[in-house]
Amino acid sequence: MDKFLIQGGNTLEGEVRISGAKNAALPLLAAMILAETPMTLRNVPNLKDVNTLVKLIGGMGITISYAGDTVHSDASTLNNQFAPYELVKTMRASILVLGPLLARYGEAKVSLPGGCAIGSRPVDQHLKALEALGAQIEVENGYVNAKVDGRLKGAEVVFDMVTVGGTENILIAATLAEGITTIRNAAREPEITDLAHMLIKMGAKIEGLDTDTLVVTGVEKLQGCEYSVVADRIETGSYLAAAAMTGGRVKTTHTDPALLECVLEKFEEMGAEVTRGDDWIELDMMGKRPKAVSFRTLPHPDFPTDMQAQLMAVNAIGRGFATISETIFENRFMHVPELSRMGANIQVEGNDAVVTGVDKLSAAPVMATDLRASFSLVLAALAAEGETLIDRIYHIDRGYEDIEAKLQGLGAQIKRVSE
Ligand code: UD1
């Protein structure tokens, strides 16, 4: 199993090119199932999760190729609507194929995703919303069996909580439903707006972009198009955090400051100088130790749960103390014991953590537990005294493209070791 060996103590400086967003690429790939004609997706990050979805879609008979940062697909060759447990269990976002299969082919058999490290993460909201659109759904032997007589029917869907995946699944399905679908309490994450933009390019009619109410007027057919995935705001924030963590200066390019304003404000509160360009952001920590900053994770446009672990790592070496509240997932502090092994002072009570900054972290063998938590360990290792070995980095490979090369380009001493 691959591990990272990181020698801490270097100040990170330079430029890093941000990849397309994993969390946008996945729903965009699922939406390709709807296209009557071939289509092309560009700026696709080369990641394990993307490969999983390409494999899942290819298994349905769809002609799909993935080379460099480009995916070409022709959904007209689809010959089954089956998503097997073997693939779905490795990536929860596989459930995103349910809405498009049902909308275009009237039936689907999709494995229920299994458990997840950061919480139970049910898909009840996805199923309830599809039922509101007229789908008959049965859950049997670990599979969701869904069908609909004729087309899905537009309806009013009200989510009980803000769900990113749920909003995406229903948005995709509603584009081909008969009549109007109103999605209330919709998630507003930039990846949803990106999805809506591609669907509109394919011929869908969607209003209310960037708001919590999406109104979709169903059409009979959607065509293929060419589209480029939006920049990864979480990757952007993670590399800016690396500058904050090491007192350095990092410029992220091919990104968009508007995607993560709330996170940038937290970096400024830490004492960093943040400069925003049209498609770049530079963070200069000017050799200073960051001030610890409190925050609470909430749906977009508030602070993203996917940046919680990384900012906790920065707080761990901050001046003063900070309170972090995680309100999206019930078990998303698994990086805390690992950071503590490196000398961090963090007290957890329920979904709140109090982080008291320490002068120095020290190297220790640690274990990655989930995708974003893994990056927090990388950050801690970059600032720690000594050489840190991070185990189970397959979690990182799910969501950070070329991480060693990108960090090395900024002056980090990181290498992958296989044992
Ligand atoms: C997506 C992101 C993930 C991010 C999360 C929250 C992708 C591929 N993943 O995950 O990186 O951390 O949004 O911003 O885009 N819930 C239910 N029932 C449901 C659906 C959700 O109870 O049917 C709960 C979840 O357990 C969780 C909360 O709602 O507590 C938010 O989940 P959701 O927004 O759906 O997250 P994902 O789409 O899975």
Image (tube, grey):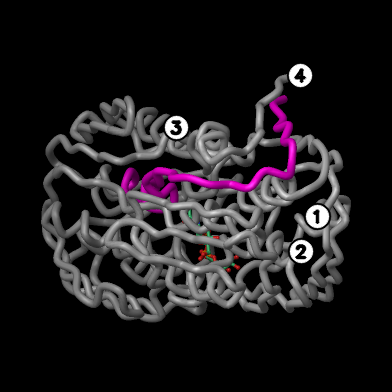
Q: In this view, does 413 lie above or below 333?
A: above
Q: Nearer the viewer, residue 117 or 352?
A: 352
Tell me where residue 334 appears, x and y as whole percent.
Answer: 77, 56
In what element is the residue under mark 4?
loop
At horizontal 48% and vertical 69% (from top left) the residue drawn is 264
Q: Are marks 3 and 1 in contact (CB under 8 Å)?
A: no
Look at the image and tell me in which quarter the C terminus lies: top right
Position in image of residue 164 (x %, y %) = 45, 65
Identify residue type, mark 1: Leu
State if disc 1 and disc 2 touch (CB < 8 Å): yes
| Residue drawn where x is 27% and y is 54% of the image | 103
- The nearer-to-camera label among 4 and 1 is 1
Q: Give the range drawn in magenta.
A: 1-30
Residue type at mark 3? Asn
Q: Quadrant of residue 417?
A: top right
Badge 1 density bin: few <14, some 14–19, many ≥20, Cα 10 Å:
many
Q: What element carries label 1?
A: helix
- Provide the secondary structure element on which disc 3 rests: helix
As shown in the figure, which amino acid type bears the numbered disc 4?
Glu
Q: Mark 4 points at which residue?
A: 419
The reply, left or right, for residue 321 in relation to residue 257 is: right
State the CA–CA distance, disc 4 to disc 1. 23 Å
